[in-house]
Image (cartoon, rainbow, N blue to C red):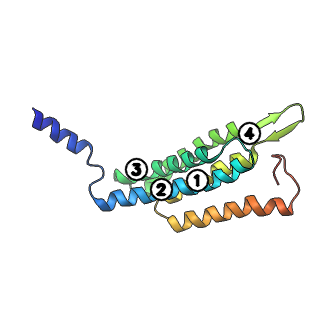
Amino acid sequence: MAEEMWSTLVKEFSDIPDLSTITLITVRLTIAAALGGILGYERERKGRSAGVRTHMLVAVGAALFVIAPLQSGMEVGDLSRVLQGIIQGIGFLGAGAIMVRSTRQQVEGLTTAANIWATAGIGIIAGLGLEATAILSTVVVLIILAAVPLVLPKDADGDR
């Protein structure tokens, strides 16, 4: 009986069969967390509601939702439904960052919501193993967040 229990436990925890797989998962999740943290730091530095932890969790969560189906044998072509779910779910999270200030008739949080959405996309890319693309995407988002305010007037979010 103890041998059967041990055998069942071994099977249950065999989703990471070798060192190569654990390295792959670790790299993808770490990159997602780091890139999400960078984007969150930018928002936190500007005093916005969603900061480092939120962005890290969004990126890691998105990466997990891609890694898990791949680990379980889902074909890459079948991931479209998973991606649609992530994008829709992040839309709800982003909506929570948007507030309407009735006293000033102003909408706030649009840039933060868009940043959360972009962070989820970067997490997806990292989860798929496209690390260089994830890093490049993060750089582009940071350029948008840093450079656009220097050239354009403030938008409805209070950002530029």
Q: Nearer the viewer, residue 61 or 44?
A: 44
Residue of label 1 = 36
Amino acid under label 4?
A: Ile
Judged by depth in the image, the label closer to the viewer, 1 or 3, is 1
Q: Does residue 123 appear to the left or right of 74 in the view shown? A: right
Of labels 2 and 3, the one closer to you:
2
Say above or below: 102 vs 28. Answer: above
Q: Secondary structure at mark 2?
A: helix
Question: Pointer 2 and pointer 1: residues touching (CB < 8 Å)?
Answer: no
Amino acid type shown at disc 2: Thr
Which mark is on residue 30? 2
Residue that numbered label 4 is attached to: 98
Q: Position of residue 21 (x, y in %)?
A: 33, 59
Callout 4: SS: loop
Q: Earlier in the sequence, mark 4 or mark 1?
A: 1
Q: Point out which mark residue 69 bears.
A: 3
For label 3, the SS is helix
Q: CA distance from mark 2 to mark 4?
A: 28 Å
Earlier-in-chain disc, 2 versus 3: 2
Q: Check disc 3 and give the amino acid type.
A: Pro
Specify the quadrant that holds the N terminus: top left
Q: How many marks?
A: 4
Which of marks 4 and 2 precedes in the sequence? 2
Question: What's the residue at 62%, 56% (across, down)?
Answer: 38
If you read the primary sequence from the N terminus, does the residue marked by circle 4 or circle 3 appear first?
3
CA–CA distance between discs 2 and 3? 18 Å
- Quarter of the picture containing the C terminus is bottom right
Whether pointer 4 and pointer 1 mark residues with C-beta atoms closer than 8 Å, the reply is no
